[in-house]
Amino acid sequence: MKEPIFLKPVFHEKIWGGTGLRDEFGYDIPSDHTGECWAISAHPHGPAEVINGPYKGMKLNELWDQHRELFGNAEGNVFPLLTKILDANQDLSVQVHPDNEYAEEHEHELGKTESWYVIKAKPGAMLYYGHNAKTRDEFADMIHNKQWKKLLRKMPVKPGDFVYVPHGMVHAVGAGIMVLETQQSSDTTYRMYDFDRVDQKTGHLRELHIQQSIDTVEVPFKMPVLNHKEWDVGDVHVTQFVMAEYFGVFKLDVNGLGNFENTDGKYRLLSVIDGQCTLEIDQQKYELQKGQHLILPSTVNKWSLDGDATIIASKPGDEA
């Protein structure tokens, strides 16, 4: 297997979603309240389908189960990564995610560390990121007393910013922001505050997970330290945003030809977020367009990119 694996995304409607996924990428979205594009997913809540090559028609979870050689014979019952694009027409709920141990015990799936590359952000757009409590008891008291302005930290963002969200981090994508999210393959979310929004289907306030949020939050808040690096591969400028326990995330600014080599035996996930370029593997060329998502299996040893494009790439970390 010496070719890329292209995938058909799965879309999810959300109370906070909009039309940005159609407007920016031309996707055929299910409604004007579409919040998430699950672009590279083997999660049972939205597995992506292979659309090319000998495995066309298979779901990514099936490919992982039946052809582990494509993924360096990696261990683990589930494909460990999930790539999404989120379109926040409104603020998302303020959330906390659990670590692997808590999630396995309570949710029977992986924990959730994630990251965001900001594709678009309206002027003045803000994220919720972190909190001001010094102890877990103080954190709980502020929640129960609804002291949201005192508790929550905000952070301005602009296109091109990268934000790392380890498990235990209080966070939310704010209105007017579109991000590419790289995360562990988990759909567990503990909602601690939702701006008193009503679920239109039930007529009731949306469910909160207060105790789980208190249990899993990191106290006090600590700003993550990232191992940011930059280098050039020919005419491709590579930015390493983070290389951590569960994944590494990179930006490839393609401005001509770059020749790459797989030196670690890991597979790569690629999402083209702007422009177009040619991917070449073993003298076979593939045209990459904005909005496409693909996997380079670990069986691909060398490849090249040539053109004018921006790609967000990721690979599993040491513990994925």
Image (spheres, rainbow, N blue to C red):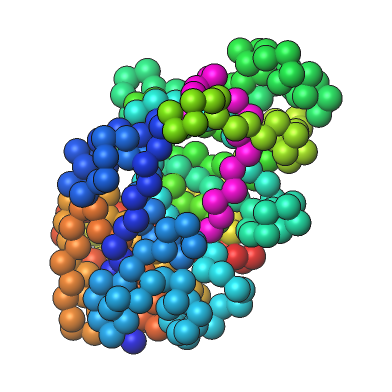
Q: Quadrant of the C terminus?
A: bottom right
Q: Is residue 8 visible?
A: yes
Vertical placement of 125 versus 46: above or below? above
Vertical placement of 19 versus 293: above or below? above
| Total numbered labels | 0
Q: Quadrant of the N terminus?
A: bottom left
Q: Is residue 120 visible?
A: no
Residue 219 percent across, percent down from the top left: 76, 32
Residue 138 percent across, percent down from the top left: 80, 21
Q: Residue at horizontal 41%, vertical 71%?
A: 60
Is the stretch drawn in magenta largely helix, strand or loop?
loop
Residue 13 percent across, percent down from the top left: 37, 41
Q: Residue at horizontal 59%, vertical 43%?
A: 189
Q: Nearer the viewer, residue 229 or 15?
A: 15
Q: Quadrant of residue 139?
A: top right
Q: Residue at horizontal 47%, vertical 84%?
A: 66
Q: Residue at horizontal 52%, vertical 68%?
A: 79
Residue 187 in magenta?
yes
Q: Nearer the viewer, residue 293 or 211?
A: 211
Q: Quadrant of residue 120?
A: top left
Residue 74 percent across, percent down from the top left: 56, 78
209 relative to 259 in the view: left or right: right
What's drawn in magenta, residue-wise? 185-199
